Amino acid sequence: MAPAAELDCRVTARDVDLRLGVPAGRRLAIVGPNGAGKSTALALLAGHLRPDSGEVRLDGRVVSSPRTHMPAYRRRVVALEQRPGLLPHLTALDNVAYGPRARGERRRDALARARTELEAVGCADLAGRRPHELSGGQAQRVALARALAVDPDLVLLDEPLAALDMEVAPAIRRLLADRLTGRTVVLVTHDPLDLWALADDVVVVLSGRATQAGTVEEVLSRPASDFAARLAGVSLLEGIVDDDEVRTPAGDAVAGIRADAAAGWRSGVRAVATVDPRAVAVHAAPADPASSSPDPRSAHAPSPESARAPAASPRNAWPARVVALAPAGALTRVTAELRDGQRVDAEITTRSAAELALAPGVPVTLVVKATQVVLYPRG
């Protein structure tokens, strides 16, 4: 079984201070906004970057620190990136055999291993082609075969599907999921599909620090940051527990269902609420700002759950202002800002958005059934 990989490192120039680990045979995804430190983590593990303090360990052995550094070529670590990086003057077969040959295997044995790996990724018939004769998906398959031909202890994936066409990416994703089973993997991605298909665990990195970690299901079902919430496809509201509700900094009440009985729920503690954009109705703001009843004109794209919800269920109503619209065919995603600056997304029909004359700056009221809001204390 592949060894565990661990980081406990600081890189001062990049303001990165990371602590994370991946158990042997597990697949860890690192997610975060651009510039958060994801690529730095991969560079530290690969041996392309040395920490200013702390250590990088593979299988419990220190491979990098301020006092010692094992170069990349001596680590049994391989990387698969957006671009396959195949050697242009070699055939697909020779590209895959290159790694075993570089590690001292006889040419005959290296070529035999290369053929086995090409067969495993469905490219045996492409053995004699050079990289410029391969499609993007074919080249990425050959790159995967090349990576696994050296029996790596650790596989690093840096957005390996980002450069592929939408028609090709699902097949490569399935291939990666199959070929990487049981291996120790660290994956950087922005795509939630990659998390569910390729990762066991996930760590959220913000401003060079790991802010949340757990299984994919744990993190996406209980996001602890706005970034993680948007990755999960929901909006996140923060506030303080006030009896059975969460009270935002502006004083808006957020009623909902407590997750997992919400252990630790008590008045005064910090709490968060997650809101599915499909459950949010957008109403024109009332003509009288003092009125709590929204204009009867409204728009929403009800989810199956909302259709089944009792008509008399309690509802949240939050005054807000539209800050962005993102039309996508028949539906439009509306991003609105509450009085305290927190943002909530709503998914409504494009026709309704037009009828309500929604545009940045337009005041609205967001209405959400309490049964479609999940509350939990902030750990």
Image (cartoon, rainbow, N blue to C red):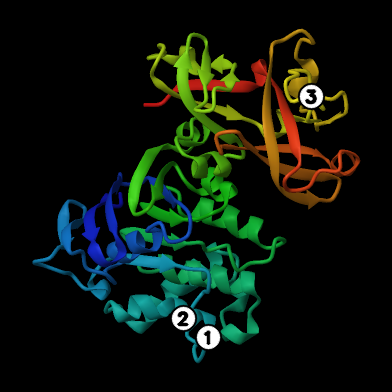
Q: Are marks 3 and 1 in contact (CB under 8 Å)?
A: no
Which numbered disc flags the more N-terminal residue, 3 or 1?
A: 1
Q: How far apart are marks 3 and 2 (CA)?
A: 71 Å
Q: Distance between the residues labelled 2 and 1?
A: 6 Å
Dot 2: few (<14), some (14–19), or many (≥20) neighbours within 10 Å? many
In the rendered image, residue 373, in percent from the top left (x then y), is placed at 61, 22
Q: Quadrant of the C terminus?
A: top left
Residue 337 visible in the displayed image:
yes
Nearer to us in this view, 212 or 348: 348
Which element type, helix, strand or loop, lies under badge 3? loop
Nearer to us in this view, 65 or 291: 291
Dot 3: few (<14), some (14–19), or many (≥20) neighbours within 10 Å? few
The residue shown at (36%, 42%) is: 211
Q: Mark 2 points at which residue?
A: 95
The disc placed on residue 375 is none
- Amino acid type shown at disc 1: Thr
Q: Mark 1 points at which residue?
A: 91
In the rendered image, residue 130, in percent from the top left (x then y), is placed at 57, 86
* Numbered disc total: 3
- Amino acid type shown at disc 2: Asn
